[in-house]
Amino acid sequence: MEIKIKQLEGVSEEYLPRYMSEGASGMDLFATIETVKNLEVGQRALIPCGFCLEMPKGTEAQIRPRSGLAIKHGITCLNTPGTIDSDYRGQIQVILINLGQENFKIEPGMRIAQMVFQRIEQVVLKPIQNLAESSRSEGGFGSTGH
């Protein structure tokens, strides 16, 4: 699949999204901030990534946390996975939150999240009065076991 990317003015090519290993599912996203951003415990911030996308209709980009930041520092993404729709043309930005126990410094050029592309399909909802029975029925929130 080909995705068009626009590098924003003043952003180094080294900070454009890229796969960090041959088998990676997600492309790492970099913080394109000019100075260090201190993310205090419980604080959230919108971090720019320095690019815009043009995706084919029927494609979305999902923004997901980086596992290393999550386990080591409690840094994750709000609204996870974040959805970038195919008709959005603005700068890609990531909502980070510090759920850790210490303040965290986001450095310029730091890898802050990952982006996974997914094919999607829009559906047509058909109103009906009754749904077909299933073995689960209306059971939810842990009804299938631990």
Image (cartoon, rainbow, N blue to C red):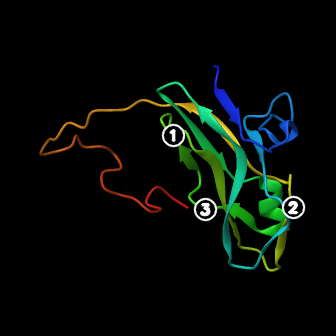
Picture quadrant of residue 44: bottom right
The image position of residue 139, as x and y in percent, is 36, 58
Mark 2–mark 1 distance (CA, rounded to whole Å): 27 Å
Q: Earlier in the sequence, mark 2 or mark 1?
A: 1
Please give the residue where the numbered disc 2 appears in the rendered image. 107
Would residue 140 appear left or right of 4 to someone viewing this image? left
Q: Nearer the viewer, mark 1 or mark 3?
A: 1
The amino acid marked with disc number 1 is: Tyr
The amino acid marked with disc number 3 is: Leu
Mark 1 falls on what kind of element?
A: loop
Residue 41 in the image: above or below residue 89: below
Q: Earlier in the sequence, mark 1 or mark 3?
A: 3
Q: Residues within 10 Å of mark 2 (few under 14, many from 20)?
A: some
The amino acid marked with disc number 2 is: Glu
Q: Earlier in the sequence, mark 2 or mark 3?
A: 3
Picture quadrant of residue 101: bottom right
Please give the residue where the numbered disc 3 appears in the rendered image. 78
Please give the residue where the numbered disc 1 appears in the rendered image. 88
The image position of residue 125, as x and y in percent, is 25, 37
Label annotation for residue 34: none
Front in this rendered view, residue 21 or 146: 21
Mark 3 falls on what kind of element?
A: loop
The image position of residue 50, as x and y in percent, is 73, 46
